[in-house]
Image (spheres, rainbow, N blue to C red):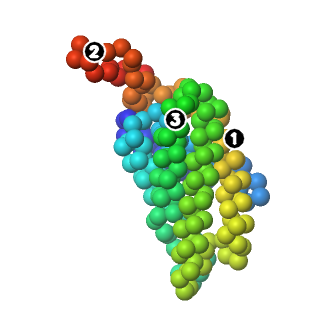
């Protein structure tokens, strides 16, 4: 994968999440383009690249979302989205062999899986941190179960957005430098040949 393209796309998605996605807000829940981008990379890139892309994107998400609750607000906690995206891409990498990679619906389905995994880890990390004195969770007096419901609806809205946005990303797949399918034909040395898109 070409890292400059990914970094530029991740920064654009992060800015869009912070400034434009509020227009699609329904009941305090808005979709996340950065999650769709990570899923797009997870479907096409090798595992090491996917893990680094998830870590970088998770750190960017954590640093862009301060907790406004508590006496020390705003508080930036690196970890909840970082671990959530890293956990989510493991599921996507495990399932990508069963996908039609050029289908935007497959990207939408995997975005739902990623969003659910990220939301679960995010709520768990903040819930555990809230056990410490003077460390309230960012959702205030609501329960963790209520926040899990919000994360579910956010994952669904992100998955719906992933279908048209994924269609646009798939049109640019050749620019990213992803390895393509493993060719069944063998070279003279007996090793499989990897062809590029």
Number of the front mark, 3 or 1: 3
Residue closest to the eye, 27 or 181: 181
Secondary structure of the residue carrying numbered label 3 = helix
In the image, taking residue 109 as reference, residue 190 lies left or right, namely left
The residue lying at 60 percent from left, 58 percent from top is 119
Q: Where residue 17 sits in the image (x, y, percent)?
A: 59, 51
Q: Label 1: how many residues lie within 10 Å, few (<14), some (14-19) or many (20+)?
A: some
Q: Where residue 166 sits in the image (x, y, percent)?
A: 59, 34
Residue ID for mark 2 = 187
Classify 5 as above or below 191.
below
Q: Which mark is residue 96?
A: 3
In the image, taking residue 61 as reference, residue 178 lies left or right, namely left
Quadrant for the N terminus in the image: top left
Residue closest to the eye, 96 or 40: 96
Secondary structure of the residue carrying numbered label 2 = loop
In space, the residues marked 3 and 2 are separated at their CA atoms by 25 Å
Q: Which mark is residue 160?
A: 1
Tell me which corner region of the image, top left, top right, bottom left or bottom right, holds residue 141.
Answer: bottom right
Residue closest to the eye, 92 or 175: 92
Residue lying furthest left = 189
Tell me which corner region of the image, top left, top right, bottom left or bottom right, holds residue 174.
Answer: top left
Classify 100 as above or below 188.
below
């Amino acid at each position: 994968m070409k890292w400059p393209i990914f970094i530029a796309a991740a920064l654009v998605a992060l800015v869009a999440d912070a400034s434009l996605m509020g227009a699609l807000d329904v009941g305090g829940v808005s979709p996340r383009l950065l999650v769709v981008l990570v899923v797009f990379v997870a479907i096409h890139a090798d595992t090491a690249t996917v893990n680094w892309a998830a870590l970088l994107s998770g750190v960017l998400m954590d640093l862009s979302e301060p907790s406004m609750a508590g006496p020390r607000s705003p508080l930036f906690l690196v970890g909840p989205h970082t671990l959530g995206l890293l956990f989510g891409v493991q599921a996507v990498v495990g399932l990508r062999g069963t996908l039609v990679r050029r289908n935007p619906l497959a990207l939408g389905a995997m975005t739902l899986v990623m969003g659910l995994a990220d939301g679960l880890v995010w709520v768990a990390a903040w819930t555990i941190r809230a056990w410490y004195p003077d460390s309230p969770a960012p959702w205030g007096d609501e329960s963790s179960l209520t926040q899990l419901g919000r994360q579910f609806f956010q994952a669904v809205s992100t998955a719906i957005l992933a279908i048209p946005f994924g269609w646009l990303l798939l049109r640019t797949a050749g620019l990213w430098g992803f390895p393509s399918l493993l060719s069944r034909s063998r070279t003279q040395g007996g090793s499989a040949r990897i062809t590029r898109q």
